[in-house]
Every structure is written in structure tokens, then in C-alpha cells.
Image: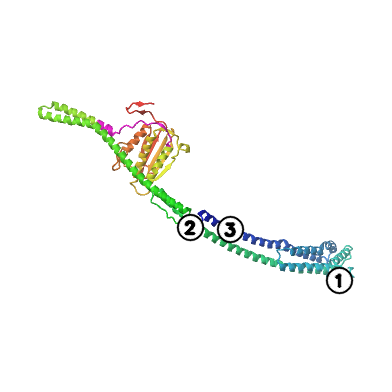
Amino acid sequence: MKLSVSTRIFLGFTVVIVAFGSACAYTIFRMTLLRESVTLIWEEVMPVASQMKDLSRQLRAPEEFLDLRRPSDAVWLARLLPSLQPFQHLRTVEARLDRLVETPALPAEDRETLSAVSQALEDFRQGDGLRAAIAGPEGAAALGLPETGSSDAIFDALVRRTVKQANERVLTASSPEVRAMTRALRRINRAVMEASRAISDPIRDLNLRAASDEKAATLAVLLITAGALVLSLVILFMIQRILSPLRDLREGARKIAAGHYDERVDVRSRDEIGQLGLEFNTMAEALSARDAELARQREELLRADRLATIGKMAAQITHEVRNPLSSIALNAELLEEELESAAEGGEARAILLQIDQEVQRLKAITEEYLAYARLPRPALQPVDVGAHLAELLRFVRRELTAAEIELRAEGVLPAGEGGPAPILADPDQLRRVWLNLVRNARESLEEVEGPRWLEVSLSGAPDGGVVIRLMDNGRGVDPALREHLFEPFVTGKAGGTGLGLALSQQIVSDHGGTLEVRDRPDGGRGIAFILRIPARGPAFRDPAGIHNGR
């Protein structure tokens, strides 16, 4: 079964997540074990060792007063000895060791060691080993100690006897109780130190094992993480290979947008991306065919418009000039006959005068025609200039793109989206102005090399009208032609008619606006047209030349 692109990417990311999740789970597991070992050392074993050391220090403290060098030593002994209670501390240590032995995290060999220490302390506490240590040459009976009993009972009896003599001020350094107490304290301290040394071995072993576990856990985590990272890189490489055709599609779309409709992408798979590539190629072929058809239709339209204009001009010229020419020809013949038969030239002079009048009339008609025929009065209606201009730019964008001209639009927005408010104007005549200016700029730009651009900006005027600026980096305008640029039949282009800008100027003027040509503000190559149209134009004139204030 062929998996889709999204399924393969999902499975790849799932593998990566599982890999890193496993690494994290193992890390947490090893860290938990390490934490348990450290917790066992610090919360269980170390307090026992500290308690044993504290007990050892307490057992050594009374020895300073047993010399009885100062009168107050007996008083301090009477206060200090009852508070020692070493066997009660030993019972506490035994209980903690017994609980520690039951801990599952403690290794078996350490449990055996700590169990042996606990048993040894219990045997010492309950046995009579202390009796032999403190009896000395005097014997236990001479000290008034019981003949039987555990070590803690014997020590308690010795403490009571020693404290009693100290309170009665009969205790001296040579008293047998003092010597017996010294031997008892040292014997108990020796048992405590032996137990403390026995406990230190598990502590050392636990520390070593914790350090070893830490190193092993760190190494294992590093290896698992490295494996997960390598696996992630492999998955990333696979995803990059799967998505690499998208880069080709993006590049192809950019070239299509630039007008290169012959661009095609290489389809290397049969998945969704491959199907998208096939659709892209189909779209490119359709755009190429449509562009060719539009170019053909545009050429036909321009040719038909040009032929229609020429035909109209020829018909009008023929209509207006044919009769005067006929009259001129007839009078010329009469003048010729008169000059041949008459000796005087009176009548010839009259005919010549008539010829001159007809010639002058013909000249007036020609001048009037060449000034350009009067446009019809604008049909005013509310026009959203931003939307109207934006629609035209969408129309000409493909034409400019085909000419490798970058079209820049600034502020060309409908009134509802931040553009200027609507004005009263004739949308068809405004469209003719836009087309004349844009195509004039395009023709100028086609004559230069390098990057070419046309910038169109729209802004509102203080009086509620609009200001449109068209600026390009084309070849510019010859300074000698600039003053006459808006006159009919004035052009700086080879083969141009010179009617486009004159027509645009007349339309703008009929709307009460102005059309100016200026250099670029930044001083670069090219030209800028600035077009201002008020919100409501002035009164217009009808074809007869009569002002209409409606």
C-alpha cells in the first residue's frame, strides 16, 4: 500500500518522538535508581553513623572530670553521668539498623553487614561483657554491683553509685568507682567505635556504587540520545527528500509570475506532490496558450482601433477638404483661361482672391481638425478611484510582466479598505487616461536595459479629490519636447501618432483636473506624471461650445 506524504511525515515524526521518549524514560529510570541510592545513604545510613560518632564524643566527655582535679568536677560528674544513657542510644541505633536491613534497595551483602553490627550491639547490651571490663582487681561485689544482669543494668548501677558518692563529697580520684567508671566508658566507647567502623564499609560501598551507577547512567543516556539524534537526522533527511519537489514548484511559480509560461517542473513521484506538479504543468500550459491568444487578440484590437481611427480621420478629411479642393481646381482652370484671353488681369485678380479665401478656409478646417475633435461631455457618476485603478492594474499586470516590468502599487485601495473617497467622474474616460499613461510608460521602459519598474501611487487630496502619480525608470522625455508633450501629434517615439497624451490631457481638463509631467523626485532616470482630479468637476461645455452649468 502506497502511503501518502502526510502519513509518511507523521510516521517519521512518531519515530522521532518515540526515540526521544525512550531516551527520556530510560534517563528518568536510571536517575530514580541513583536518587534512591543517594537517599538511602543520606537519610538512613549517614544518620546512624553520625549518631554513633556523637555517642562516642559523649562517652569521652566525662573522662575530663573523672580526674577530680577541681572541686567542681564531682558536681559536674553528678550532673553529666545520669544524662549519658549510652545503652538507650544503642537501642535506638539497633532499631534503625533493623529497619535499614529491611530496605529493598540495600544490597544483600550490606544487609548482612548491618545485621551483624545490630546483633553485636544487642549482644553487648544484653550480655555481661561489661561486668568483666569494670570489675578490675576489686571485683564487682566490692563496687556493690549486682552479681547478674545485663550490661546496661550494671552500668546504671555503677552510675547511681558514683553519683551518690559525688553528691556526698566522698568521691576521690582513687575511688574504685572512678576507676570502674573510666573502664566502663572506654569499653562502651570501644564497642561503639567498632560498630561505627563496621557501618562505614556499607557507606563506602554505597558511595562507590552510586558513583558507578551515575557514570553508567550518563553513558547510557548519551548513547541513547545519540542514537535518537541520528535517527532524527535520518528522518529529517527523508522528509527533506519527500518535500524537495515543493521547492521546484515554488521556483516554477515564481517564473510563471514573471511571465515565463514555458516553465515546467519535473514530476518524480506519484504522490500528492507529484499530482500537484502535474496540475502545475497543466496550468502553465493553459497560461501559455491564453497569453498567446491574448497577445493575438490585443494585436488585432490595436490594429482594428488604429484602422478605425485612420478611417475616421480619412473620412472627415475627405469630407472637409474635397469640396474646397474642387473649387480650387475649377478656379484654377478659369484663371488659366482668363490669363490666356485677357490682356488685362482684373478678373484674374478676383479669381486669385477667391482662391486665397478657399485656401484659408481649408487651412482653418485643417487646423481645427488637427487640434483634435472635441470629446463628448463626461457622463458623471460616483467612481471609487482606488477600486477602478486597481482593476485596471490587474488588467495590465500581465502585459507589464510579459515585458519584464515590475509593477509597484502604493495606496491603490478601494474606499472601504482605506483608499480615497469616491469622486464624480466618467469611469470610461478615466480608464482611457489610465491606459494611455501606463502604456506610454511601458513603451518608454521597453527601450532601456536592466531592471525596469513602473510605480503607481494613489492618495487623497485636501479638497476631497484624488492625486495619482505614475513614475518609471524609463528613458525619460527630451527636454525640447516637454513643453509640447500634451499637444496633438507631438511625440518623441518613432512611429507614434502623438494623440495619446493630448487626449488624456483633454479628458483630465474636462474633469476640472490637471496633468503634469515632472522629473523623478530622487533625480534618477525616468519621468513622473502627476494627475489631480477634484471630487466634483466644474461646469462642462456642450459640443456647440455653450457652457452647461447643470
- Give above or below for 26 relative to 272: below
Q: In this view of the protein, can residue 491 be seen by the observer?
A: yes
Q: How far apart are marks 2 and 3 (CA)?
A: 22 Å
Is residue 449 left or right of 79 when viewed as pictured? left
Q: Residue at x 42, y 42 (%)?
A: 409
Where does the magenta region start and end?
364-385
Residue toward you, 221 or 133:
221
Q: How many marks?
A: 3
Task: Rate crowding at label 1 as few (under 14), some (14 to 19) or many (20 or more) other CA atoms within 10 Å.
Answer: many
Q: How far apart are marks 3 and 1 (CA)?
A: 73 Å
Q: Mark 2 points at which residue?
A: 241
> Which quarter of the picture shows residue 18?
bottom right
In this view, the residue farthest toward the front is: 1
Task: Rate crowding at label 3 as few (under 14), some (14 to 19) or many (20 or more) other CA atoms within 10 Å.
Answer: few
Label 3 secondary element? helix
First in residue order: circle 3 vs circle 1: 3
In the rendering, at what x and y percent does residue 320 appear?
25, 31
First in residue order: circle 1 vs circle 2: 1
The disc placed on residue 303 is none
Q: Check residue 434 for magenta coloring.
A: no
Q: Distance between the residues labelled 1 and 2?
A: 93 Å
Label 1 secondary element? helix
